[in-house]
Each structure stands twice: as structure tokens, then as C-alpha cells.
Image: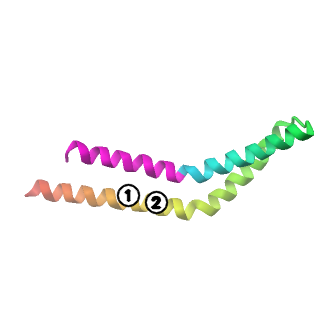
């Protein structure tokens, strides 16, 4: 295994990490922005007002996006296992 293959694996790992975390982070960002706007307009400064809707929205986003996240993780893991298998075959020869 050379340096470019190692860098390619690292790049793919970071890409999968970003793809998996992006829906949850965007959900938290949008809900936080909406709640902050609501608090600014109504001048209600209650801390639990921003916390509870975020938890509910993130839980719903997880339920919706878990299959997509699992598919990305499965594809990355399968590709990584295939690379490991080809490395072992190349070392045997």
C-alpha cells in the first residue's frame, strides 16, 4: 500500500463523515435559527424553548436519515474491506 492509497482512504473517510453528519447538523441549524428568530420577535428568552424543539427535530431527522447514513457507511466499509483483501493477496504473491 502506498501513500496515495492511504490518502485516498483518509479522504473517503472524511467525505463519509461529512455526508453522514450534514443532515443532522443542518436540521439543528435550521431549527435553532427559527427558534432564535421567534425568540427575538416575541422577546421570550427561555432556554428550554430552544432546547426541546432541537431535540425533537434532531430525533426526527435521525429517524429519517438513518437508512441513508447506514448505506454510506456500509459502502465505505465494504470498499475498505475489499482494499484490505487486495492488499493481502498482493503480499502473498
Q: Which residue is tagged 1?
A: 77
Residue at image position (74%, 48%) is 31
Which residue, as the protein is rendered here, is positioned at the far left?
A: 93
Residue at image position (74%, 53%) is 56
Residue 17: image x %, image y %?
Answer: 48, 49
Is 73 placed left or right of 38 in the picture? left
The answer for how far apart the CA atoms under marks 1 and 2 are is 9 Å
Q: Is residue 82 above or below residue 9?
A: below
User: Is residue 9 a member of the stretch shown in magenta?
Assistant: yes
Near mark 2 (Cα within 10 A), the count class, few <14, some 14-19 or many ≥20, is some
Residue range in magenta is 1-20
Numbered-mark total: 2
Residue 83: image x %, image y %?
Answer: 26, 57
Q: Give SS at disc 1.
A: helix
Q: Which residue is tagged 2?
A: 72
Q: Earlier in the sequence, mark 1 or mark 2?
A: 2
Q: Give SS at disc 2.
A: helix
Residue at image position (33%, 60%) is 79
Is 21 placed left or right of 41 in the picture? left
Amino acid at each position: 500500500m502506498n501513500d496515495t492509497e492511504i490518502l485516498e482512504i483518509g479522504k473517503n473517510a472524511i467525505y463519509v463523515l461529512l455526508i453522514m453528519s450534514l443532515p443532522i447538523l443542518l436540521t439543528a441549524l435550521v431549527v435553532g435559527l427559527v427558534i432564535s428568530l421567534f425568540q427575538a420577535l416575541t422577546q421570550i428568552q427561555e432556554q428550554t424553548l430552544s432546547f426541546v424543539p432541537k431535540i425533537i427535530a434532531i430525533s426526527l431527522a435521525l429517524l429519517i436519515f438513518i437508512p441513508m447514513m447506514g448505506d454510506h457507511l456500509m459502502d465505505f466499509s465494504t470498499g475498505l474491506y475489499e482494499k484490505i483483501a487486495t492488499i493481502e493477496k498482493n503480499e502473498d504473491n
